[in-house]
Amino acid sequence: MKTNKYSRLYNRISSVCLASVILLTISCKKALDVVPDNVATIDHAFANTIEAEKYLFTCYNYLPSNGSTGGNVGLLAGDELWIPDYRQYFQAATWSVIARGQQNSGEPAANYWDGMHEGKDLFEALRHCNIFLENVRNPDKVRDLRVDLRARWIAEVTFLKAYYHYFLLRMYGPIPLIDKNIPISAPPEEVRVKRRPVDECVSYISSLLDQSYADLPLVINNKNDELGRITKPINRAVKAKLLLLAASPLFNGNPDYASFTNKDGEPLFNTAFSAAKWQAAAEATKTAIDEAEAAGNKLYYYKIPEFEMTDTTMIQMSIRGAVTERWNDEVVWGLSNSRANTLQRAAQPLLHADMGINSAYASLAPTLKVVQQFYSDNGVPIEEDKTRDFSQINQLRIAASSERVNFETRYETARLNFDRENRFYASIGFDGGKWLTSDLPARKDYEAYTVKAKMGQISAGSAFGLFSETGYYAKKLVNWESRFAANTSIWEYPWPEIRLADLYLMYAEALNETSGPVSDVHKYLNLIRQRAGLESVSDAWQKYSKNPAKPTTKDGMRAIIRRERLIELAFEGSRFWDLRRWKESAKELNGPVRGWDVNQKDAIPYYQVRTIFQQRFIAPRDYLWPIRLDEMTVNDNLVQNPGW
């Protein structure tokens, strides 16, 4: 197994989990920001540089585990991916509760307010951050800590403090602001904190990000030990995400929350739309792009093939590698604490006899709805393409020899799988489709393994939850160097929390909302499309779309940008949050989850559309997470989110 460059940081973070437990001795949490009454233990934690560094990594330890099915909230809580009812290999409360319409205020899934049901306690994280900052800012503590390191560590934890507030804001809306810890001896009214208005939350988080920026490094030089630590580009990227969230319809002029107030009647939402918020988001995102590019970030391109590969395969390898190639140049922020291991197993179907069902679970299935969202090979939506007929998606077809890179020739598969863009073939596995791995004996891309997914075939899986519910597979999440045979290891990669492509799409979105489809909107969309082997937006719509004028209007370009985000960031957990901030969840998550009839062994019955589940989303209730009822009882100054 190859050495993981980020493993040392990961192991150091893991080693301080016990410290978190020791330092939290409050048996019943009466407030969110009460400092533990164990000063002797805390003094020891800041006695010297070695001990203080352990506490630094305690603060890092609460970052989301987005490289896992349970930790990545957006991965399974929406409509992109579905898993079987028999969940032997999953901790998937987000799927079994949220995606299936069972979220509740008694025991909420993905509870990041007080750390339950696959959530991390982010208010506990904020207490740790405040303890760290209070002590490390004190020159009488950690006396052997170098001045430059002291400044950097303070900046890192100030950033983490901002990020944890941002994470809570995105989930819960208005939140208490934990600026400092309150002594445990403080009177009850002082410790029972209130939720603050959304605009105040955004301003506070933004100020923390600005405070921490100057003392962060532009790049990580000590790559063996420090990859995943916070940098200037990460800081600016998170600020861009914060301001984009604040500008989006959920938080910008949303009338649904006009009556949502604190107990003293203070409005928690500003229901007046502000165009200036979109302008601020555009400026912040352009700054983030400039900062990232100055640090060396660029779109990932696969350039040195290991064996015979066509241009088509090279494009698809670039798309796959942007997510799964460790620390590639496109990754602005990689999560060292979250390595994609089980996630790859969940996405991988069996391809040959040496693979074992205990290694390749094949259970993480793209839904038919999302499969249909990918463009045609002409770079426009399949329902808009005037040169391609997708009206009968299950019509059977056999691939020609010219299509052998993507298909097994002489094998019947559905019309829907043909004539699609490279991001489709790079991201999705399907019955009759090729799946390229680095251990391919033939050493030729057109002789890659074939997914054979009908009942009784090798890729169909087993009856114990190890199969695709839809007939599709999340190829994008599997590194092509991973091995799934006995006595082999997964080629783990740190989760790409923020990619440069995401920033490009964010900038295009914010700028379009501010100025319409101006040249820079097209520029940054086209950079991503170029990597995918597609023509520019203008050329593709002019040549192939039934609606050629679509890119010339703000509304039309908005629809294009949103679809580009779905396609480019598919299966990374982004769509779930995008639908919420756009206020599109009520439209998109109130429909059927569909796939092929995977219980059939012959092509005609297999390629019949089957409804797997009927999703339900109640608006406006489900746009914000519920606060657990027990928390409401402990702190009677809290108000519950509307509908819960």
Image (spheres, rainbow, N blue to C red):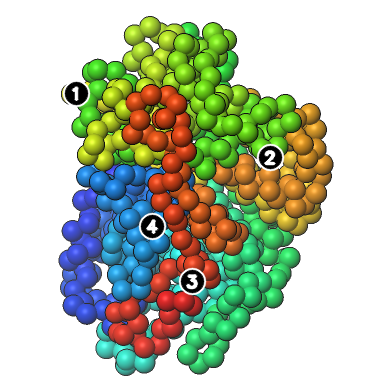
Check residue 157 in the rendering and tell me which mark sits there, or answer none: none
**Residue at left offset 48%, top offset 63%:** 617
What residue does disc 4 label?
Answer: 100
Q: From mark 1 to mark 4, how far is it between C-alphas?
A: 35 Å
Of labels 1 and 3, earlier in sequence is 1
What residue does disc 3 label?
Answer: 621
Q: Type of residue at label 1?
A: Ala
Q: From mark 4 to mark 3, how far is it between C-alphas?
A: 15 Å
**Residue at left offset 43%, top offset 46%:** 611
What residue does disc 1 label?
Answer: 486
Q: Quadrant of residue 188?
A: bottom left
Check residue 524 in the rendering and tell me which mark sits there, or answer none: 2
| Closer to us: 421 or 181 | 421
Q: Type of residue at label 4?
A: Arg
**Residue at left offset 48%, top offset 71%:** 621
| Closer to us: 222 or 142 | 222
On the question of residue 234 being in view, the answer is: no
Of labels 1 and 2, earlier in sequence is 1
From the top left corner, tell me how far across and down residue 419 is, in percent. Answer: 60, 24
Which element is circle 3 on? helix
Q: From mark 1 to mark 2, how far is it between C-alphas?
A: 44 Å
Q: Type of residue at label 3?
A: Arg
